[in-house]
Image: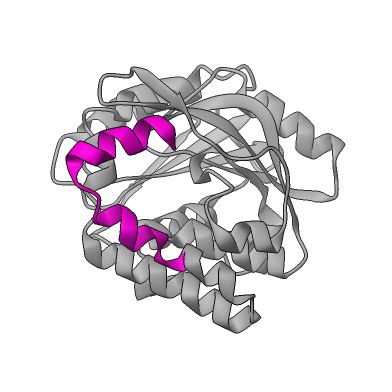
């Protein structure tokens, strides 16, 4: 399917890829298998050094809905996603990570919800966590329903790769913020910006995505990124003059980063 000026996709799926040759095919396959087919898949290779780009190029030859470009150097997730948004033609922007798996009805369910609820700007959903071998080991614990500014500022309430957003609202907050504090927390900052502006976010009580978060994935984050995340949370909390008790949520990333592997296995099971 080719998009012309008169026929545009309803949904633009944005995906940044960096060295994900092991999982990228599964991620793309899950998008191409969606029951809702009126979309474009915009993929940015953020200067991968593995075979990710070669794998993606094979898909480009097979499906004209895929838009693919490469960064000439590693620019990070926020910048790469903003570059995808610049190319987006759809009314809605759907996020997808290069190692996750969207269930076949994800776009159909989220699209219909946004079409039926004009006051909602971002819709997310529940998901299940899978490990390196695609084995489901737990449900990702987030609450369903509306997400307020205080919900967003405290902790993860919206799983980034599950969301579909109205593009006009995303552009109105200038997309993803790019600075040292958002290197690994660009989604947290976005939800704070959107809810602060009065935009409504809603989580569906439906599992529509398999989220890859194995033990090694949880531990691989460099501690400096956890420090940056904590600083970003502190910045928002101080800016909005939240109650002192909420500041405890700012140090959670630091605590998790100190948990030994042996205890992390327990943490995975009870989170």
Of residues 247 and 16, the one nearer the viewer is 247
Residue 245: x and y in percent read 57, 70
Image height of 141 relative to 158, above or below: above
74 relative position to 99: left or right: left
Place residue 99 in its image quadrant: top left
* Residue 183 at least partly seen: yes
Image height of 134 relative to 158, above or below: above
Residue 5: x and y in percent read 66, 43
Across the whole image, how many numbered discs are drawn on residues? Answer: 0
Residue 27: x and y in percent read 39, 27
Residue 165: x and y in percent read 66, 47
Of residues 16 and 130, the one nearer the viewer is 130
Q: Which residue corresponds to the image point at 57% horizontal and 25% vertical from the top-left?
A: 208
Span highlighted in magenta in the image:
250-271
71 relative position to 200: left or right: left
Look at the image and say whether residue 218 sits in the magenta stretch: no
Q: Which residue corresponds to the image point at 31% horizontal and 34% vertical from the top-left?
A: 266
29 relative position to 86: left or right: left
Look at the image and say whether residue 267 sits in the magenta stretch: yes
* Residue 53 at least partly seen: no
Q: Which residue corresponds to the image point at 30% horizontal and 26% vertical from the top-left?
A: 131
Place residue 1 in its image quadrant: top right
Q: Which residue lies furthest to the left in this view?
A: 49
Place residue 109 in its image quadrant: top right
Q: Which residue corresponds to the image point at 44% horizontal and 25% vertical from the top-left?
A: 138
Quadrant showing the C terminus: top left
Q: Main secondary structure of the magenta part?
A: helix
Of residues 195 and 12, the one nearer the viewer is 195
């Amino acid at each position: 399917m080719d998009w012309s000026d008169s026929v545009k996709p309803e949904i633009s799926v944005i995906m940044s890829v960096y060295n994900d040759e092991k999982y990228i095919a599964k991620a793309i396959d899950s998008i191409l298998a969606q029951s809702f087919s009126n979309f474009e898949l915009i993929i940015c290779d953020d200067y991968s050094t593995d075979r990710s780009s070669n794998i993606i190029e094979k898909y480009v030859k097979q499906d004209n809905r895929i838009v693919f470009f490469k960064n000439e150097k590693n620019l990070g997730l926020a910048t790469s996603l903003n570059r995808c948004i610049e190319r987006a033609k759809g009314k809605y922007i759907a996020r997808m990570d290069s190692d996750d798996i969207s269930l076949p009805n994800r776009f159909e369910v989220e699209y219909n919800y946004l079409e039926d609820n004009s006051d909602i700007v971002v819709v997310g959903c529940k998901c299940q966590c899978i490990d390196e071998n695609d084995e489901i080991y737990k449900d990702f614990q987030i609450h369903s329903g509306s997400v307020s500014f205080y919900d967003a500022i405290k902790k993860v309430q919206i799983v980034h790769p599950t969301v579909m957003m109205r593009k006009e609202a995303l552009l109105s907050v200038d997309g993803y913020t790019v600075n040292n504090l958002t290197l690994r927390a660009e989604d947290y900052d976005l939800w704070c910006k959107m809810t602060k502006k009065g935009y409504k976010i809603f989580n569906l009580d439906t599992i529509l995505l398999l989220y890859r978060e194995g033990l090694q994935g949880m531990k691989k984050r460099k501690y400096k990124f956890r420090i940056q995340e904590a600083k970003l949370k502190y910045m928002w909390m101080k800016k909005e003059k939240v109650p002192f008790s909420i500041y405890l949520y700012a140090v959670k990333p630091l605590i998790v980063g100190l948990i030994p592997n042996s205890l992390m296995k327990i943490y995975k099971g009870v989170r």
